[in-house]
C-alpha cells in the first residue's frame, strides 16, 4: 500500500449494515476498518482534505447521554468525508415533551438520514431502531453494554505503537462492571489475539457468568505484571448502586495508576484511558500527561480517523 492508496475492501464487500456490537463485524471487516482508519489518519496528519465519499449523505448524531469525544469526533468525521451532519440538541428536543426515544429517532430518520449515531442507556433500543429505521444505525454508546467505535479506535491506537495486538497483554483496570468500553475492548482485543485481563476490586467486576474467558485480577500487582498496555477506566458513579460505591473507597491508594504502579507492568508499557479522566481518582495527572507513557491524546486523535473509517465502510456498503 503506498502512502495515499486506500486498503482494498474485503473480497465479499462489507456485509455489516449496522454497528451495534463489535460482533456485528466479521474478522475481515474489522481488519479492513483498522487499515482504513490508519489510511484516514494519514490525511489528518498531513492536514490534507480527505476524499468526499459521503457527499450528499445525511448523518444524524442523536446522543441521549452526555458525550464530548464521541459526539464531536463523529461530527468531525462525517464533515471531513463531506456528509451533511446534524447534531440533535437532545436537551432542547421533544423528548422533554414526552416523545419516546423511538418516535424521536423515527422522526429524524424521516428527514432523510442515511446514518444515525445513537447513544442511549435503554437496553435493546439500538436493535429496535435498526429494525425500524431505513438507515444505518451506529452505536455511540449503549449503557454499560457496548461502545464498539471506542474499541476500534483503541485498537488503532495500540497498533500505532505495536503494529499488532497479537500476543500483547492488555490490562483493563478499574470499574469494569459499569464500563461499556471494557466490554467492547475485551471482545475486540481477544478477537485480535491479545491476552486480556480485567483488574480491579472484586465489587467492580462483571457478574461471574459474564466474560468467562477473561482472566480477572483483584490486585494491581498481579493485574499489571507483564502488561504491555494498561487501560484505565473511570468510576462510573452514574450507573452504580450504593453497594458498588463501597468498592470505590480508597480506590486510588490500592488501584490508582501512577508512574510508580506502572513499574509493575512491562518496561515501556503504555497507559490508555477512554476519557473523561478523573485525575487523582483512577489515574495520576503526571502519568496521564507523560507523552512517553500515555497514549490518551492519541486515542482522541485516532477517534476521528476511526469514525471516518466506520462511516465510509458502512455507508459505502449501504
Ligand atoms: N467515554 C466513555 C464512554 O462513553 C468512557 C466513560 O464515559 O467513562 O463510555
Image (cartoon, rainbow, N blue to C red):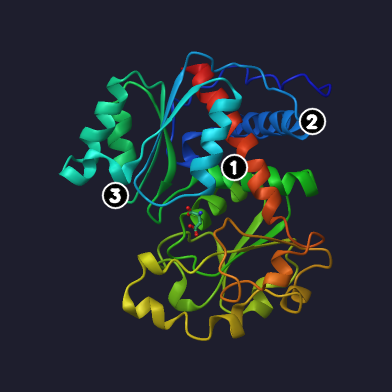
Residue 187 drawn above or below residue 239: above
Point out the frontmost of discs 3 and 2: 2
Q: Which residue is mark 2?
A: 46
SS assignment at label 3: loop
Residue 184 drawn above or below residue 56: below
> Which residue is at a point 58% across and 73% down the rendered structure image?
282
In front of the other: 300 or 12: 300
> Which residue is at a point 43% across and 47% down the rendered structure image?
141
> Which residue is at a point 47% across and 80% down the rendered structure image?
248
Whole-number angstrom distance, CA of label 3 to CA of label 2: 40 Å
Residue 196 drawn above or below residue 306: below
In front of the other: 141 or 200: 141
Whichever of callouts 3 and 2 sits on the residue coming sooner in the sequence is 2
Residue 50 placement (x, y as % from top left): 68, 22
Q: Are marks 2 and 1 in contact (CB under 8 Å)?
A: no
Q: Residue furthest left?
A: 98
| Figure quadrant of residue 108 | top left
Q: Which residue is mark 1?
A: 152
Residue 296 placement (x, y as % from top left): 67, 56
Residue 102 placement (x, y as % from top left): 23, 36
Whichever of callouts 1 and 3 sits on the residue coming sooner in the sequence is 3
Whole-number angstrom distance, CA of label 1 to CA of label 3: 23 Å
Q: Is residue 186 visible from the viewing direction of this image?
A: yes
- Number of callouts: 3
Asked if ligand 1 lies within 8 A of label 3, the reply is: no
Q: Which residue is mark 3?
A: 122
Amino acid at each position: 500500500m503506498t502512502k495515499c492508496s486506500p486498503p482494498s475492501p474485503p473480497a465479499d464487500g462489507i456485509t455489516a449494515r449496522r454497528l451495534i456490537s463489535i460482533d456485528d463485524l466479521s474478522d475481515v471487516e474489522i481488519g479492513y476498518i483498522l487499515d482504513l482508519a490508519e489510511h484516514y489518519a494519514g490525511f489528518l496528519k498531513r492536514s490534507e482534505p480527505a476524499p468526499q465519499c459521503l457527499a450528499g449523505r445525511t448523518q444524524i448524531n442523536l446522543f441521549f447521554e452526555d458525550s464530548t469525544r464521541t459526539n464531536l469526533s463523529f461530527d468531525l468525521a462525517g464533515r471531513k468525508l463531506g456528509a451533511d451532519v446534524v447534531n440533535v440538541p437532545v436537551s432542547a428536543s421533544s423528548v422533554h415533551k414526552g416523545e419516546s426515544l423511538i418516535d424521536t429517532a423515527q422522526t429524524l430518520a424521516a428527514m432523510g438520514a442515511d446514518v444515525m449515531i445513537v447513544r442511549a442507556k435503554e437496553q435493546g433500543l439500538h436493535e429496535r431502531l435498526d429494525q425500524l429505521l431505513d438507515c444505518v444505525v451506529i452505536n455511540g454508546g449503549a449503557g454499560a453494554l457496548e461502545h464498539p467505535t471506542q474499541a476500534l479506535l483503541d485498537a488503532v491506537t495500540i497498533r500505532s505503537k505495536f503494529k499488532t495486538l497479537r500476543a500483547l497483554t492488555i490490562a483493563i483496570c478499574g470499574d469494569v462492571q459499569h464500563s461499556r468500553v471494557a466490554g467492547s475492548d475485551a471482545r475486540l482485543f481477544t478477537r485480535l489475539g491479545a491476552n486480556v485481563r480485567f483488574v480491579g476490586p472484586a465489587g467492580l467486576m462483571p457478574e461471574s457468568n459474564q466474560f468467562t474467558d477473561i482472566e480477572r485480577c483483584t490486585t494491581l500487582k498481579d493485574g499489571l505484571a507483564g502488561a504491555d498496555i494498561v487501560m484505565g477506566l473511570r468510576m462510573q458513579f452514574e450507573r452504580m448502586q450504593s453497594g458498588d460505591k463501597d468498592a470505590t473507597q480508597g480506590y486510588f491508594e490500592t488501584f490508582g495508576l501512577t508512574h510508580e504502579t506502572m513499574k509493575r507492568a512491562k518496561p515501556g508499557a503504555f497507559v490508555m484511558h477512554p476519557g473523561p479522566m478523573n485525575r487523582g481518582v483512577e489515574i495520576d495527572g503526571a502519568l496521564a500527561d507523560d507523552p512517553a507513557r500515555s497514549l490518551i491524546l492519541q486515542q482522541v486523535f485516532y477517534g476521528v480517523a476511526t469514525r471516518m473509517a466506520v462511516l465510509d465502510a458502512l455507508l459505502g456498503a449501504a
